[in-house]
Image (tube, grey):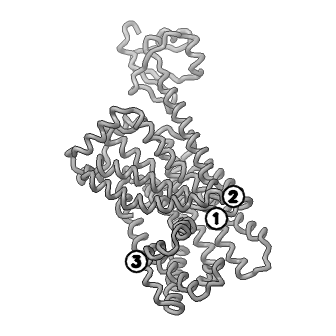
Amino acid sequence: MIIVLGANDNGEGGTFALYSLLCRHSRMGLLNSSHLEHEFVTCYDSNVSTKETRASLVIKEFFNKHRSSRVVLLLVVLLGTSMVIGDGIPTPAMSVLSAVYGIQIKDPDLHENYTVAIACVILVGVFALQHCGTHRIGFLFSPILIAWLLCISGVGIYNISHWNPDVVKALSPYYIYNFFKKTGKAGWCSLGGIVLCATGAEAMFADLGHFSELSVRIAFTGLVYPCLVLAYMGEAAYLSRNRGDLQSSFYKAVPVFIIATLATVVGSQAIISAIFSIISQCRALNCFPRVKIVHTSNNIHGQIYIPEVNWVLMILCLAVVAGFTEAYGLAVITVMLVTTLLMFLIISTVWKKHVFLAFLFVVIFGFVELSYFDAGLAKLHKGGWFPLVVSAVVSSLMSIWHYGTLKKQAYKVSLDCLLRLGPCMGIATVPGVCLVYYLCCPANVGTFCPQLSCIPSDSYLCNHSVSVFDCSKSSGQ
């Protein structure tokens, strides 16, 4: 929240935004970013030093010299981006299902099918509201989330004072060291069971297009994080005196499952809107198929809604609820690792700080993330594989689409060839500017004119299938 949130690309956050920022300030990227080279993010113009450091020059020279390094960087970015999308399927499903599970705590005789049906109805309602836009949804959900956070923090304070006030000692790093020292490998593997506590951090970063940097920082550091710490400490205090309630400790310690269900709906919204932002960024850089992007705000550019993605996510989430019962945060931790690695390049080449600071950032945060990642691998066969498979499919789709886009852009026709094709295709030329709409596939064009050469890239608008030429410069035309 403090460091990474500052590495935004003109208000957009997420893995792809970091890559776009690198493309803007250097030639590390493979994507066509010529339209970005002469644009600068306003928040960096006045704060970032224009003086290149030695490390920055060495890193840029390395990427310029070795094309394979740029390919690897792009693949890593696509991996991180696909991991967010892959995590966006089980996260809403598991969040809502686990919240609805609180009903069974109150009514043990309730059949599991009814719990699944209730969760499916809630999910359909969440996705049906997406077309209203972030502003209206936020206005509706904010009171629910604030009530939930105040509730769990208040109950947490009560549990700490009532059951075990000594639990506050857990804030000391000594106890986690002592815990690992006594439990060894078993204690290390237990990190995989609490990795879901960290989910949502990457979603907040990707949601930066929907909210401002300041609002996210104030909300997280001033309200969300303290309330969560108090809630978890309260649950730990309760468990220390009621170890028999291990499987249902949350709803025994926080007996408000109705508000919990509503709060998980709000939490699901974060990852859904984050996926919209990420796919929009991928689409802008030709790494995702064309989708309809609906801007839901006249004031905030990043508030968008993508109908096709919304309904596909809903169907997949319902499928997960119906046939899948476990999820672990391997995808989220992988995204965090990718973000940390990209931040090394951002700090050293974009912010132009000393390479030691960038290395220190990677060591501190990377160690924590690798710890969770290693522990989560033990849960791979129990459900952690699902978001990874989805991520692999999405990553393959983006890679293939990007490859096809490059091949499409490489197919260009010269002005002379086009003028020779004019009479055959029924094109009339007049002095001035002409617009030629391509109505046939490239293979058919090749049959008309086998002597194909290049069109200047600045006059070829491939996204609209239109080419612009200045015909007045051609003699006799």
For residue 149, above or below residue 360: below
- Looking at marks 2 and 3 on the same chain, the residue that comes earlier in the sequence is marked by 3
Residue 408 position within the rendered picture, expressed as x and y whole percent measured from the top left: 52, 26
Q: Estimate the spatial distance between the alpha carbons at disc 2 and disc 3, rounded to whole Å.
A: 40 Å
Residue hosting label 2: 320
Query: Quick one: label 3, few (<14), some, or many (20+) residues within 10 Å?
Result: few
Element type where label 3 sits in the image: helix
**Element marked by disc 1:** helix
Instruction: Describe residue 320's horizontal placement relative to residue 369 as left or right.
Output: right
Quarter of the figure with residue 292: top right
Of discs 2 and 3, which sits in the foreground? 3
Q: Which mark is residue 225?
A: none
Which of marks 1 and 2 precedes in the sequence?
Answer: 1
Q: Could you give the CA–CA distance between mark 2 and mark 1, rounded to whole angstroms?
A: 8 Å
Q: Are marks 2 and 1 in contact (CB under 8 Å)?
A: yes
Q: Is residue 71 above or below residue 172?
A: above
Say which quadrant the C terminus sits in. top left
Q: Residue at 59% x, 58% y: name it.
A: 130
Amino acid at dot 1 = Met
Q: CA distance from mark 3 to mark 1?
A: 33 Å
> Which marked residue is nearer to the observer: mark 3 or mark 1?
3
Q: Which residue occupies 67% across, 68% down? A: 97
Quarter in which the N terminus is drawn = bottom left
Q: Residue furthest bottom?
A: 162
The residue tagged 3 is 174
What is the quadrant of residue 262 in the picture? bottom right
Residue 378, how many percent across, how many down? 59, 60
Q: Nearer the viewer, residue 263 or 305?
A: 263
Residue 298 visible within the image: no
Tag 2: Cα neighbours inside 10 Å, few (<14), some, or many (≥20)? many
Residue at 37%, 34% in the rendered image: 34
